[in-house]
Amino acid sequence: MNYISTIKLAAILGALTVAIGAFGAHGLAATLEQFGRTATFETAVKYQFYHTLGIFLIGLLQAKLPHAKLLDTAVYAFLAGIIIFSGSLYLLSTTGTNWLGAITPFGGVAFIAGWILVFLAAKPLAKG
């Protein structure tokens, strides 16, 4: 994945995150209150946004380190984390299906793996 594709992905995810957050705050307020999951939904939006920003920053790193394939893998890990972590929390919040909470930690692991990959990929920066 080149840096332009990564930045475009971040832009799409950023727009989607804002739309989901706004829809949750306005269109889903009654449903979230019904299941007592407003804070859970907000957590999903926050983590999606944090990792969307992470993807954007990786795009900037990819411009400087075009051969760092670990950065590509970090993008995919963050994307998997968004889908699994935030996605499961969105579904849990809007359906009240509590077993979905068992899936959420796998998304958290993907986020952690992504950050570790960014750390490892940045090693060439230390060499100048």
Image (tube, grey):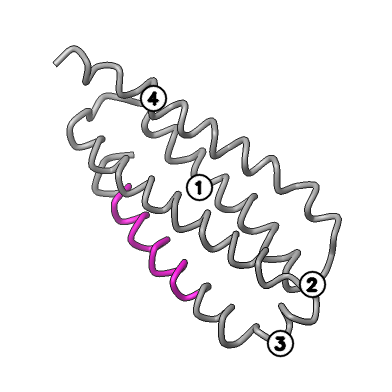
Q: Give the range drawn in magenta.
A: 6-19
For disc 4, the marked residue is 119
In the rendered structure, the answer to whether residue 48 lies left or right of residue 65 reads: right
Circle 4 — which element?
Answer: helix
Give the residue type that dot 2 points to: Thr
Marks 2 and 1 close (CB-CB < 8 Å): no
Give the residue type that dot 4 points to: Phe
The alpha-carbon separation of the residues under discs 1 and 3 comes to 29 Å
Closer to viewer: mark 2 or mark 1? 2
Give the residue type that dot 1 points to: Leu
For disc 1, the marked residue is 79
Percent position (x, y) of residue 45? Answer: 54, 63
In the image, residue 110 above or below residue 32: above
Mark earlier in primary sequence (1, 3): 3
Badge 2: how crowded within 10 Å, few (<14), some, or many (20+)? some
Tag on residue 30? 3
